[in-house]
Image (cartoon, rainbow, N blue to C red):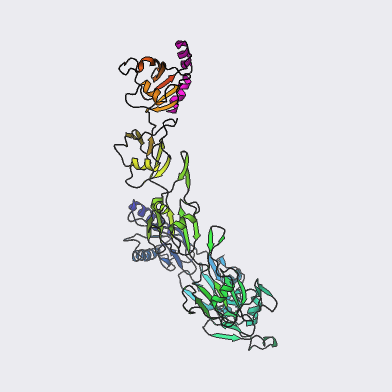
Amino acid sequence: MFAVLLAALTLAMAQAAPTDAYRIGPYDVLQIVVPEERTDAPIVTTDALTVGPDGTVAVAYLGDVIAVGKTTAELSEEIRVGLIEAGQFVSPHVLVRVREYGADRVSVLGAVKEPGYFPFREGLAVRDAIAMAKGVQLEIAANPLARLVHRDGESVTFQLNEALRAEGAMADLLLQPGDAIIVEESAPVSVLGYVHDPGDVRVREGARLSEVLALAGGIVEPGEETFEAGRTPGDSTRITINRADGTTETVSLMGADEGTTRDDPAVFPGDVIYVPASRSEVTVLGYIKSPGVLVFRSGDRVSDVIAKAGGVIISSGIPDNILEIGDLSAIRLYRADGTELLVNLDSRVAGAGDPELLPGDSIVVPRREQTYYALGRVRVQGRHVLPPGSRVLDLYTAAGGTTTVDALPMRTTDADLANCVLARADGTQLVVDLQAIAQNPALEANVELVHGDSLWVPEADRRVIVAGYVQSPGYFQFREGDTVREVIAMAGGPTISPADSYMNDGDPRNVLIIHQDGAQETIDTTVEDLPVRPGDEIRVPYARQRVTVLGYVVRPGFVLWHEGDTVLDMIAAAGGVNTDDGDRFSAVLIRRGPEGPQFTRVDLSGAHDMDDVAFNVEVLPNDIVMVPRSDHTDWGDWLTNIRNALSITNLIGALF
């Protein structure tokens, strides 16, 4: 099969390629196939990989691989060697084919107004292609550089301004099919602190600080409300600029309005600007109970203002079954001078790790990232966030427990709780018996969770049905080696009812086992036992060891039958004849047979003589003994009435 696949793919590639020496260019669409070399090896099949303007394609297991300028054979060999070195294959066959050729277009990317692909035409110059992209975005372009990447992978860096002029050496720089122009983007400038719209802004190179602050909405002026906890203006006299080269500069804009540039310096891509608060205030944000701006006293520490803000959120429920919890071990403290400190209040000792606050500080309490996942046969699949120290059973409970199915007269789970899998964040796996843990949470198997753990509850593949006369019929999971007797015990055992009850007892001596393949066998579980198989149906019948005594007796109903019991024994077991109305000298024995019920009159006057076999008639299981009223006169008419009421005996038989 492998040889046929290899031959077919090789033929297809030979037909598709224009020449053996064709070299891959940008925007070519490649097909890469690695046929299976052994049953447990992965198969890499990628039908549509477009070569990017940088000349690379993304290959499974290897990441970005340079394709531009290579033949398909050269790229195949490079991928083959890479897969071997990555440990994914032993001796793979790699097939590369060019499905589509991208030589009929060029691309303009980066800091242009409408980047994209454009049709190629003869005589197309760089300035024409940039015009197709609606021109350069001056505020984000890293003047004056751009790159021209050819199909063969070679690239040229050129001065953008020269290429855009109508005259000059670069003005007539013409493009080739498949070329890509990349206008380099400048890094953004970050504006933080007490401005209206903090964040990243794009500015032209050489823009002044005041211009950048205006793009961020301007500095918050006194009286403007920015947080629910109060009004906090920014301090324009202590603005910090952290330069991209690592230097720091503190600037006052108080003289900038006078037209000078000394206090309004130029800002460059990658700079970080921080505007501090103008008073001895600190901003507390994140997962705390009352975020906002707080006034602090000299000597106050991080823990003091967090306490003033109500402390961290401990268990505030939000939608989607997620609990948000503040993380005291990863607090971020941002100083007014632009420095950043990581504060761990979980492990501080005598003030260590709990720094004093300075005016303009900002504190951010992140969410404790204790995220777990519950998948498979649970009610709420997906992401769950629980408090630190949570265990497997807690995650199972948060997921709502297992799903259920209708099973006979009850609903039961269709999950295999005894064989759950806990995939740990470190890549290891544990088999977890949630069935045992639910019964005893103190078990060592109820391990503490680690951030990123995933619990998989599989569908049960070892289930049996226990039906018939048991206490709790339904589906039951069994462990390897469990027997018929044990799963009947899981169902509560056979039914047992009082002697005067019309309920039937389960019969453990005639248990029917129907296997998944249709085979059947009957066993006496009181003397033998068998291991169960997946899909078995175990039926416990009712015990046919009773006799029904009806009519004028003290306790009409079912009575237990024993070997050798007689009509008189059954009447005695039913409390004897009712002396007020019952006939003490006659009874009727009804026995059902293949030809219908047979009626036998029994003369009780002689039945007291144990030696008189003719009168002391033995009964069999399922017989019916009826004692009539004492005032009836015609036995023939009475028996006829009983026969006409045969539906009653049928009803009695149904009760068995």
The answer to which of 233 and 45 lies nearer the viewer is: 233
Q: Position of residue 276 (x, y in %)?
A: 61, 80
Q: Which residues are magenta?
A: 628-656
The answer to which of 96 and 195 lies nearer the viewer is: 195
Q: Position of residue 417 (x, y in %)?
A: 41, 51
The answer to which of 459 and 629 lies nearer the viewer is: 629
Residue 71 sits above or below residue 8 on the image: below
| Quadrant in the rendering for residue 453 | bottom left
Q: Is residue 189 left or right of residue 225?
A: left
Q: Residue furthest left?
A: 527
Q: Position of residue 192 (x, y in %)?
A: 59, 77
| Quadrant in the rendering for residue 313 | bottom right
Q: Position of residue 408 (x, y in %)?
A: 46, 38
From the image, give the main secondary structure of the stretch colored magenta. helix
Quarter of the image with the C terminus in it = top left
Q: Residue furthest front?
A: 580
Is 652 one of the magenta-colored residues? Answer: yes
Residue 598 sits above or below residue 381 on the image: above
Residue 255 sits above or below residue 160 on the image: below
Q: How many numbered markers are drawn? A: 0
